[in-house]
Image (tube, coloured by chain):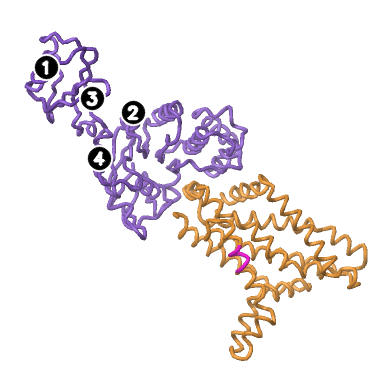
Amino acid sequence: MRQLPIIFKREFSSFFATPLAYVFLLIFLVLSSVFTFYLGGFYESGQANLNPFFNFHPWLYLFLVPALAMRMWAEERKSGTIELLMTLPITRFESVVGKFLAAWVFAGIALLLTFPMVLTVNYLGDPDNGAILTGYVGSWLLAGAYLSVGSCMSALAKNQVIAFILTVSVCFVFVVSGFPLVLDAFNGWAPQWLLDAVASFSFLTRFQAISKGVIDARDLLYFLSFIAAWLMATAVMIDLKKAE
Amino acid sequence: MIKVTHLTKRFVQKVAVDDLSFTIEPGEVVGFLGPNGAGKSTTMKMLTGFLPPCEGKVSICGFDIGKQTLQAQRQIGYLPEGAPCYGDMTVAEFLHFIGQIRGYRGQELKQRIARAIALVELQQVVEQTIDTLSKGFKRRVGLAQAVLHDPKVLILDEPTDGLDPNQKHQVRKLIKSLAVNRIVIISTHILEEVSALCTRAMVISHGRLLVDETPYELQSRSRYHQAVTILAEQPVDRSLLQALPGVAGIEDNPLDGSITVLAEAGQVIFPVVNQLIHAQGWQVRELEVERGRLDEVFRSLTRGDAA
């Protein structure tokens, strides 16, 4: 565990070594505002809450977060530094979790930089700040879930573009699995438990529940175990694929 | 001490390393020799714990690399093939990172980094991003990283590959200076390197250990071992040379017009050849005894392995 902060630090600062971090922050902030004000109808709704802001996060993350995660392991494999990293005296846990946390904290910073949104809504009205806080927590957990999938896909594919596409696809499945579109396809023939299982895997239902202001232990557990499972899959992938 | 027993690695299409067993003691500089794809790198990857073997065991200073991976890895400094480094970091940042991972903090960390930088002469590029460095400097960064913790075992995969002659010379000098009381394993397909650096040569081909002996012994397998090359002013009487005891044959070197007198196995023919030259009064411009040609030994050992 002693080496985890060192891996974290290196990984975190590597975001800022390239323009990637700044481009990501810029796009995230611009798009999240565009979505909130234009597509979300923030003013038109006439309500002092951040629902128009949070509602778009699952879709915004769908393309932005995989871009953040795609280089995590693919880059190491491509440049051969994975051989260096894996022969240093660190555990697999330290390297996988250290890298993941670096990306997750970075996503958290991007999220915190949207604070003007909170100021705006507080200036305009009298919002439920507790619900805004849980919205942020939910959004951050959601980003973590996307990142954990991205981490695994990045370990699977040597090519970053392929890692990106795979991550988007897998995350998309988890987003839409709560949609009527998907559930209707199961409706009528599948047993109820399967329907419930598919719906309960959805990011969307979990995320919406949290961002309404209620942090249910089950939703929290869902996201955390989801992340843990994908990180374990990452470790397995690395061992399978590192030699190629 | 490194102890390797029945090490085997199979990939889907082929057997990369086939039942390798050897022991290396401190103070030895071992050269892995072999054609490309012979299994040298795969062996090193298993020694350093990067790849798990399919069968067999590797013990590094008493630690089993499969079971006590971290303890074993602490004993090893490793330069992977091509010397991969994090290109977005500066040399100082990179060595700082490696030093911290190796468990050093504060003053000791600073001292270790300074020492490694001095050892491989990186002073002038310390603040440069690794991506902007020349190949030679990158290689040296890789070496600095490998020696930072003063490891008991140094494993270097093609440390001089792609360097210019001056850089090669420098890296060899460095390896020689590091070899005292350590185990150094290098892989190479540059044969001169083996006789210049190593105390022991292992020829690996198709994943098997073909030969394990000193570079001198390896050279003496050559049919040119103890051969005498004569560059004379005027044509000499070959029949006289041929008749000398221990002479196996005579070869022409059309390039410079010299002739090479080959010795029979185990025979030393220089004294008799020299006597003959004096007795006949031949005007000889150059006279050279050969130890053997490694490239020729290498080819005959690994023939048909062209990958």
Q: Report helix, strand or loop for mark 4.
A: strand
Task: Kindly report the distance in space between the C-alpha atoms of the residues bearing marks 1 and 3.
Answer: 16 Å
Q: Callout 2, which amino acid?
A: Ala
Residue drawn at 69 percent across, 54 percent down: A106
Lower sequence index among marks 3 and 4? 4
Which chain is home to disc 4? Answer: B
Q: Nearer the viewer, mark 4 or mark 1?
A: 1
Q: Report helix, strand or loop for mark 3.
A: strand
Counting from the top left corner in percent of width and height, residue A228 is at 58, 65
Lower sequence index among marks 2 and 4? 2
| Mark 3 lies on residue | B253
Residue drawn at 80 percent across, 66 percent down: A53
Q: Does the magenta segment cover residue A167?
A: yes
Lower sequence index among marks 2 and 1? 2
Lower sequence index among marks 3 and 2? 2
Counting from the top left corner in percent of width and height, residue B90 is at 61, 37
Task: Kindly report the distance in space between the C-alpha atoms of the residues bearing marks 2 and 4.
Answer: 17 Å
Task: Indicate left or right for B171 with B103 as reference.
Answer: left
Q: Callout 1, which amino acid?
A: Asp
Residue B196 is tagged as 2
Task: Kindly report the distance in space between the C-alpha atoms of the residues bearing marks 2 and 1.
Answer: 37 Å
